[in-house]
Amino acid sequence: MEPRRLETPLGPLDVRVGRVADVEHYCALKADVLAEETWFITEVDEFDASEGLNARLLTSLLEGDNSCFLTAWMAGGLAGMLLVQGGHLRRTQHVGRLEIYVGEECRGIGVGRALMEAVIDWASSSDAVSKLSLAVFADNKAAVRLYERFGFEIEGRRPNEYRLADGSYLDDLLMSRPV
C-alpha cells in the first residue's frame, strides 16, 4: 500500500503501513482506547502492553500475506491504527479479521474512514484474502455505520455475549464483506 496524505479539520493525516518500530505508539494508543472501557471486550488491565510481545504480533502481521498493520499519523502522533489478522488454518486463510483503534480526540474527522479505505485497497490487491470480517458491539452505532459504508453486512448477532462490570449485557454483531 502506498502512503497517503489527507486533510482533516485537525490538520494533515498520513496513512501508511505500520512498522514494528511503531510498537510503543501501538501500545499507548491501544491502552488509551481500552481505558475508555466502551469499545472492546478487553479491559485495559487485561492488555499486556509489553513491547516485546506486541512487537512479535506486529511482526507476524507484517510478514503474513493475509494480514496487515496500517497506521494513521497526525502532528500529535498516532491517531489511529487498523490490524487485519489472517486465518492460520487452511480453511480460514482467506479471511482477515479486522480491528480498528482511533484515539478519542481524533474521532469524527475521517481517521476511521481513511484507514478503512486503505484496508479495502490492500485487501482488493491481495491474492490471499477474499473476505474481511469483524465483531462490533451492537450499540456502537458510529462504527456499524462506518463498516456499512464500506460494504460490510451483518452476518449475525450474538445476544448478551458480553457482561459488563455493572451486570448489564451487550450484544455482539458479526459483520463481513467479500473482497
Image (spheres, helix red, strand yellow):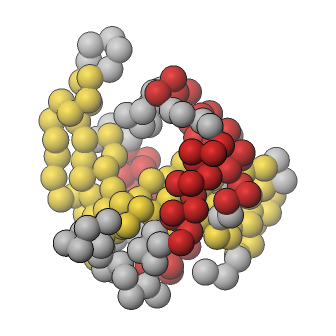
Q: Is residue 149 above or below residue 65?
A: above
As drawn, the residue found furthest toward the right would be 75
Residue visible at 50% across and 59% down in the picture: 83
Answer with left or right where residue 132 lies relative to residue 143. Answer: left
Where, quadrant-wise, is the C terminus in this rendering?
bottom left
User: What is the quadrant of residue 90 in the picture?
Assistant: bottom left
Q: Position of residue 20 (x, y in %)?
A: 67, 59
Tell me which residue sits at (36%, 52%) in the image. 144
Is residue 94 positioned above or below 35 on the image?
A: below
Q: Which of 32 and 75 is in front in this view?
A: 32
| Horizontal and vertical percent position of residue 136 | 34, 46
Residue 173 coordinates in the image, percent (x, y): 25, 47
Q: Which of 17 and 12 is in front in this view?
A: 17
Quadrant containing the N terminus in the rendered view:
bottom right
Residue in the picture at 32% in, 20% down: 164
Left or right relative to 77: residue 147: left
Residue lying at 35% horizontally and 78% vertically, measured from the top left: 129
Note whether residue 10 is visible: no
Task: Residue 126: tell me if it is visible.
Answer: yes
42 left or right, relative to 77: left
User: Looking at the image, which is closer to me, 165 or 91?
Assistant: 91
Q: Which residue lies furthest to the top in this view?
A: 166
- In the image, residue 86 above or below residue 175: below
Residue 32 image position (x, y, % from top left): 62, 33
Report the number of discs. 0
125 and 117: which is toward the camera: 125
